[in-house]
Amino acid sequence: MTDLRLDPAFLAKLEGLRLSVRRFRWGSRVGGRFVINRRGSSIEFDDYSPYTPGDDIRAIDWNLYARSDRLYVRTYKEEVELSVEVMLDATRSMGLPTPDKFQRTCEIGLCLAYVALARGHRVRLSWIRPGAITATPWMAHRSDIARLTQQCAQVRPDGAQTLSAWMQRAVPALRIRGGQAILLSDWMMRPAECFQALQLLRRRHAELKVLQVLSPQELDPAKLLRSGVVVDSETGMTHELAYSPAELASAVIDHNEQLARFCKRHDILFAQHRLDESLAELVLRRLPACGVLEPVR
């Protein structure tokens, strides 16, 4: 991978941005600037909330149950920090059709990490790939961007790993609960894999943001090939390709629209990035326009 260092002048421009926060239910540590209603026990009682499976039964108000014949748990006000999980797809497909795709994915992830660090949030990067779950420690200072950049530069896209299977391992291993989870991938996988992985994070009360990084060739596959046998770079599965250019274009559009529709239906912020768009255009202009980022007021 070529040099990943972000230009100091560009980092200075990122200082004028922050991550949008649309809903915030869980934090990582007490003492931040976000006020939430947490189930369980704390200092300041706030209200009651209907019991849902997984809630601590010690938080149930049994006196209220005796009067209403319904289960409610006590909720309390707490001020917590925002934890930000940046998850980067590092499977083999991210290095195709050009290594620039994975490099750009890392650059976007680092930009988002810096925006979060500049606002005092805790940030952690993890890589979606086979084998043991790989993630950085939690970072909390602007200067930590150098460590995050160094660790990103050491990762190469390789191997096969389904997103849902990785997420099933990563959620408990990383103890993901609440905050924001930002996923960067080409999302060139079966739609069911995408949806299952995102639902796993939604059940952990995380606010999700999805970024799709694609090369121009992937968005217009007819320019690459029109017939022959296609080999999946990760699974090795083959598929005979005999489609018209219009059919290929339609299949790509339909695949990407399924992801976009799912995100919209479940209130997940979604943005697509082409490699022929500059990093500055994406981060400084388009991500604020679509609500992933917002200007600091």
Image: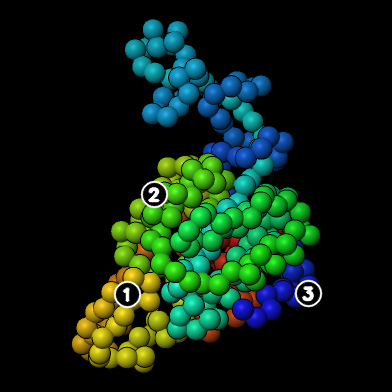
Where's the C terminus, which quadrant? bottom right
Amino acid marked by disc 3: Ala
Q: Give residue 92's position: percent from left, percent from top.
A: 45, 73
Pointer 2: residues within 10 angstroms few (<14), some, or many (20+)?
some
Amino acid marked by disc 1: Gly
Confirm or deny contact between disc 3 and disc 2 (CB under 8 A). no
Identify the mark at residue 199; answer none if there is no mark: 2
Q: Nearer the viewer, residue 143 or 275?
A: 143
Residue position for label 1: 236
Q: Give residue 105's position: percent from left, percent from top.
A: 55, 71
In primary-sequence order, the first of circles 1 and 3 is 3
Image point (48%, 50%), residue name: 170
Amino acid marked by disc 2: Gln
Q: Is residue 203 above or below residue 136?
A: above
Q: Is residue 201 above or below residue 256?
A: above
* Residue 20 horizontal side relative to residue 12, left or right: left
Confirm or deny contact between disc 1 and disc 2 (CB under 8 A). no
- Asked which secondary structure carries label 3, the reply is helix
Residue position for label 3: 9
* Residue 131 horizontal side relative to residue 259, left or right: right
- Asked which secondary structure carries label 1, the reply is loop
